[in-house]
């Protein structure tokens, strides 16, 4: 019986390890392995805004867990307050993971036909870091919101 | 790449806002993970473009990167304007191209 439960546990742990390749590689080999699309959050932001200022705003709401046990699957939800009319809408929502090798997660270009400026997905986080959401408004301004997510490495064991 | 589109809620009327979930079965390899058996780095393989069209008009365009989780789910909103077809085109960095669609049929 003991042996059986041990084997079961071992199976679960190895399954988890297989599921979180990014965590293992980011933590152990951060300096050795460079991803093919490596980009820091500063250059990613610069590419998005073209050097314009990004203002933290309560209009942008970013919801992510404060503590993520499994960094391979972190649910992230962004919504931006906007009438989404033809003259006043959210042009784009950008999701950035500030300390990932490639900080870009998704750039979502919306249209007024969306009705609401919302975007939700699940992202991989290599370590404890800030998740940043940047909203590009139709008047050319950039609003942002960020949240720190604590990633428990090996949290599935 | 297998894909699925879900529209929530099931019943909706013209003018209402529905949630569109696009799901894809995809490994989303980051290009940084080493294969345990061979010790070789697994090449990056991820979805890099997802485009949503309603009645052939661009609804939302997404550029995505390897930081999305395995088998990603991408959710957006859509204001139902008419009866029609929602089409989603997804591409990955190895050239795999998938088109999927769902009928939008508002009631009342």
Image: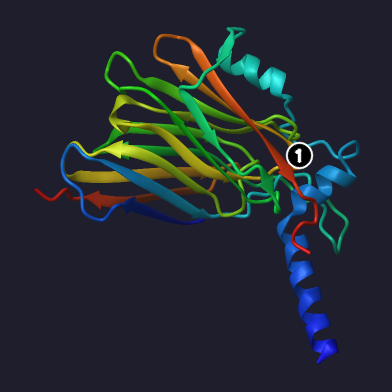
**In the image, is A142 to the left or to the right of B22?**
right
Above/below status of A98 relative to B98:
above
Q: Say whether residue A36 is left or right of residue B61.
A: right
User: Would you identify the image quadrant in which residue A54 lies?
Assistant: top right
Q: Nearer the viewer, residue B103 or B106?
A: B106
Residue receiving disc 1: A128
Q: Residue furthest bottom?
A: A1
Looking at the image, what colour scheme do you see? rainbow
Task: Determine the residue positioned at 71% across, 53% down.
Answer: A69
Label 1: which secondary element: loop
* Camera-nearest residue between A131 and B83: A131
Q: Position of residue A50 (x, y in %)?
A: 59, 10
Left or right of residue A28: residue A115 = left
In percent of width and height, residue A89 lies at 35, 19
Q: Position of residue A83 (x, y in %)?
A: 30, 22
Residue A84 visible from this viewpoint: yes
Residue B33 visible within the image: no
A26 left or right, relative to A118: right
Q: Can you give x and y, in whole percent of width and height, for residue B89 in the image? A: 41, 43
Residue at the spot 74% in from the left edge and 24% down from the top edge: A40
Q: Residues within 10 Å of mark 1 (few under 14, many from 20)?
A: many
Residue A29, quarter of the rendered image: top right
Q: Tell which subunit mark 1 falls on.
A: A
The residue lying at 36 percent from left, 22 percent from top is A82
Q: How many marks?
A: 1
Point out the residue furthest to the left here: B108
């Amino acid at each position: 019986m003991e042996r059986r439960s041990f084997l079961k546990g071992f199976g679960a742990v190895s399954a988890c390890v297989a599921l979180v390749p990014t965590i293992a590689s980011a933590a152990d080999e951060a300096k050795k392995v460079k991803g093919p699309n490596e980009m820091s959050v500063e250059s990613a932001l610069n590419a998005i805004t073209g050097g314009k200022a990004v203002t933290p705003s309560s209009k942008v709401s970013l919801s992510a867990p404060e503590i993520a046990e499994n960094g391979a699957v972190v649910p992230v939800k962004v919504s931006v307050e906007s009438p989404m009319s033809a003259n006043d809408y959210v042009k784009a929502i950008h999701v950035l993971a500030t300390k990932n090798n490639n900080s870009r997660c998704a750039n979502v270009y919306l249209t007024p036909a969306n009705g609401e400026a919302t975007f939700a997905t699940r992202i991989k986080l290599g370590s404890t870091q800030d998740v940043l959401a940047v909203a590009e408004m139709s008047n050319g301004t950039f609003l942002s919101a960020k949240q720190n997510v604590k990633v428990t490495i090996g949290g599935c064991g | 790449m297998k894909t699925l589109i879900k529209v929530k809620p099931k019943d909706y009327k013209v003018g209402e806002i529905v949630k569109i979930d696009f799901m894809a079965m995809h490994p989303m390899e980051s290009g940084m993970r080493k294969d345990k058996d061979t010790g070789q780095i697994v090449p990056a393989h991820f979805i890099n473009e997802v485009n949503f069209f309603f009645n052939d008009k661009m609804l939302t365009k997404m550029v995505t990167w390897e930081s999305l989780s395995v088998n990603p789910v991408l959710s957006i909103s859509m204001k139902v304007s008419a009866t029609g077809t929602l089409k989603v085109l997804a591409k990955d960095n190895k050239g795999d191209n998938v088109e999927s669609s769902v009928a939008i049929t508002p009631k009342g």
